[in-house]
Amino acid sequence: MIDATADWADTLAVFDLETTGIDIDTCRIVTAYVGVLDRDGRVVEQRSWLADPGVEIPTAASLIHGVSTERARAEGLPAARVVAEIVAALADAAARGLPIVAYNAAYDLSVLSREAERYGVAPLPGPGPVVDPLVIDKAVDRYRRGKRTLTAAAAHYGVELVDAHDAGADAAAAGRVAQAIARRYPEVAVLAAAELHERQVDWARLQAESYQDWRRRNGEPEFVAVGAWPLR
């Protein structure tokens, strides 16, 4: 067992989006959060956004994150401004040497990348190093049964998650899950952040290949799983 002072886990930038849907090419940002956790998992910096995505928010999405089209239009900032400010906040964190933690990072970072392109915002450099507790958890505990949602991972690693699908709550929980993984798995904790990033590139690819193979062997011969990480 190691102490919580693994270098990459000492101070983390945490990031989460809530959006209009699940398709990274078409969905829009509704809420966002960028924070910083200290080595004990306490939030020491934070910034959040509510955007007017410029499109209708489907009822199914509103039921998940609680933001209606009417509220976004009345209270939200222009989407282009929100995207630019998120990119700037994450770039600042990266410039300070902080790994960016996002659960299922390939979704959030890809959505942000598409939104930046949509509004003519310079994209987030890299991005990296990125820490994705979903990819790491699947690698270090490959055969654990059950769901791999953030809620399930938080429960498994003893991390409190109140108000799931709130961008701030999810981002902080993802960072604390990453720190819990570092405490439990010394072989992960000892890696430099850049090396951990590269390991995740390989892990994500292998995980996608394995999942694709399983789906094809179970009646979906044309199924394709995309393993690109941290951007799709």
Image (cartoon, rainbow, N blue to C red):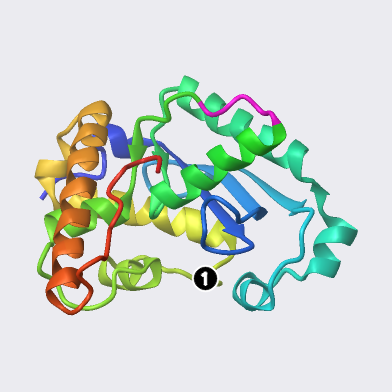
Residue 229 place in picture, x, y as percent: 32, 42
Foreground pick, 59 / 196: 59
- Quick check: is 122 in the magenta stretch? yes
Q: Quadrant of residue 157?
A: bottom left
Q: Tag 1: residue type?
A: Ala
Q: Residue at x 86, y 59 (%)?
A: 73
Q: Residue at x 12, y 62 (%)?
A: 142
Residue 90 appears in the figure: yes
Image point (29%, 69%), residue name: 148
Q: Residue at x 22, y 35 (%)?
A: 196
* x and y percentages locating residue 158 in the rendered image: 30, 68
Q: Nearer the viewer, residue 205 or 139?
A: 205
Most common SS among magenta residues = loop
Q: Badge 1 is on which residue? A: 164
Q: Nearer the viewer, residue 194 or 118?
A: 118
Left or right of residue 129: residue 73: right
The stretch of residues the image draws in magenta is 120-124
Q: Compared to 87, does 203 lie above or below?
A: below
Badge 1: few (under 14), some or many (20 or more) residues near its Cα, within 10 Å?
some
Would you place residue 29 above or below residue 144 in this image? above
The location of residue 202, given as percent across then percent down, is 18, 41
Secondary structure of the residue carrying numbered label 1: loop
